Amino acid sequence: MNLEQAREKLAKYGQEHVLSYYDELSEDKKKALLDQIDSLDLSVLTLCDHREQLAKKGEITPLAAMQLDEIEKHREEYEAIGTAAIKDGKIGAVLLAGGMGTRLGSDDPKGMYDIGITKPMYIFERLIHNLTEVVEKTGTYISLFVMTSDKNHDKTTAFFKANDYFGYDPSYVTFFKQEMAPAADYNGKIYMEDKDKMSTSPNGNGGWFLSMERSGVLDLIHKRGIEWLNVFAVDNVLQRIADPVFIGATLAKKCAVGSKVVKKAAPDEKVGVMCLEDGKPSIVEYYELTDDLMNAKDQKGDPAYNFGVILNYLFQVSGLEEIAKTSLPLHIVEKKIPYMDEQGNYIKPEEPNGYKFESLVLDMIHMMDNCLPFEVVREKEFAPIKNRTGKDSVESARELLKQNGVCL
Ligand code: UTP
C-alpha cells in the first residue's frame, strides 16, 4: 500500500491522525506503518457509533443439559465411543492462548504463569499434563493446535521448546496466530502505540477457526483426518481435554457441538448460561439474565437457566467450515489500552481507557443447529485463573488443584 492509498483508507474511517508522525519516520518505519494500515480491518471502528444495537438478543428459552446422573448411567457407552474416535485420529484439540491476560497482570503469555508453590508448575504444563493423561489412556497422540497472537507468539513457542513440550510429542503440536484488531479511544479514534504503530490487540477468541483456515492449519486437519475439535481456554487448570466421555456423548446424541457446563453456584452467579435463542443454541450472559429468566423453573422445578459455560467445546469440523462462510458478530469491550500520548510518552493506563473489538467463540454456538450442554463437576473440572487473588484467581485455582490431589 502506498501513502496515497493509506491516506484514503484512513480518511474513510476518520483516522487521519495515524499518519501524524509519518514524515519523521525512517524509510523502514514508514513501510511498516503503511503495511499495518493495509493489513488492519478498520471498518470495525464504525461499530462505536451504534454500540447499543450490537447487544440485541432474540427470544430466550431453556435448553436442557445432560446432567451427571444421566452421564453416569451411560458412562461406559460414551467412553467407548469417545475412545474409538480418538484412536481413529478423529479428534484434535485447540488451545486458545492468544489472549492478553490483562487481569492477571503478567507481561508473559498467561500459560507461562508459574502456579507452583514448592516447585515450578506452569499453566501450560498443567494443561499438557491433563491432555497426556488421555494420550496414555488411549495409547494415541492427539494433535494439539495452539492459537497465539502477534503479541505472544514468539514467547509462547520458545517456552514450549525450552521445556521440551512438557513431554508431549512436538510433531503433534502446531502453533498458529490469530488476527489483530485496532484498539480505539472512546471516540473511536485508534490509539497509537508508537509513532510508526497503531495500538492493536488480538481480535477475540471467536476468530480461531478463520485463523486456522488462513494460516493453512485446516489443511493439516484434513490431512490427518481430524473431524472434531475440542476448543478450550488457557486458564482453566483443571480442564479435561479430549475427554472421551464428553466426546462420546456429543457423538451419540448426534449434536453439531458439545459444551461442557457446570451447575451455577448461585442464581446470580456471573457466568454465561446455555439456552436457546430463537430456537437455536446460545449463551445468555449474566448481565442479560432478567429476573424472570433467573427465576424460571424447568419441569422438575429446578432453575431453567442453571448451567454455565466453561469455554470447553467440541465442534464438528464440517459444521465449522459451514459457519466460516458467514461472519461472526463483533463485540466492543472496554479495556486498558497502552498508548503513546501527545508528548510521545508510552502510557500504561490503570483504568479502562477505550475499546477493543472482539468476536467470541460463544457466538459460534448460536450458528450451530443443536448443542449438547454436558454437565461436569465444578470442583473437579473448573479452576479458571483470571486474577492474581480473589475469585477465579491463582489462589483459588491452587486450592482446587490441592483438593484434586495435585502436589504444588
Ligand atoms: P479471556 O476472556 O479471559 O481474555 O479469554 P484474556 O485476554 O485471556 O484475559 P483478560 O480479559 O485480558 O484478563 C478467554 C480465553 O480466550 C483466549 C484467552 O487466551 C483465554 O484462553 N483468547 C482471548 C484468545 O485466544 N484470543 C483473544 O483475542 C482473546
Image: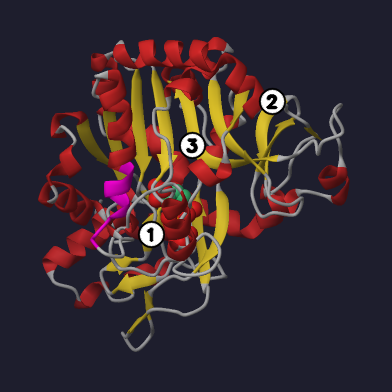
**Residue found at the very far bottom of the displayed protein:** 343
Q: Is label 3 in contact with label 1 (beta carbons under 8 Å)? A: no
Helix, strand or loop at mark 1? loop
Among the 4 quarters of the image, the one containing residue 218? top left
Helix, strand or loop at mark 2? strand
| Comparing labels 2 and 3, the label whose residue is closer to the camera | 3
| Comparing labels 3 and 1, the label whose residue is closer to the camera | 3
Residue holding disc 3: 312
Q: How many marks?
A: 3
Say which mark, if any, is on residue 133: none
Q: Residue at x 49, y 14 (%)?
A: 76
| Distance of label 2 from label 1 (alpha carbons) | 31 Å
Q: Position of residue 6 (x, y in %)?
A: 33, 57
Q: Is residue 261 left or right of residue 160?
A: right
Q: Position of residue 241 (x, y in %)?
A: 39, 33
Image: magenta residue range? 119-127
| Distance of label 2 from label 3 (alpha carbons) | 19 Å
- The answer to if 120 sits in the magenta stretch is yes
- The three-letter code of the residue at mark 2 reads Lys
Q: Is residue 113 above or below residue 227?
A: below
Q: Position of residue 3 (x, y in %)?
A: 27, 59
- The three-letter code of the residue at mark 3 reads Asn
Packing grade of label 2 (10 A; few <14, some 14-19, many >=20) is many
Residue holding disc 1: 100
Q: Is label 2 in contact with label 1 (beta carbons under 8 Å)? A: no
Residue holding disc 2: 280
Q: Is label 2 in contact with label 3 (beta carbons under 8 Å)? A: no
Q: Residue at x 25, y 19 (%)?
A: 140
| Distance of label 3 from label 1 (alpha carbons) | 19 Å
Among the 4 quarters of the image, the one containing residue 7? bottom left
Q: Residue at x 23, y 60 (%)?
A: 120
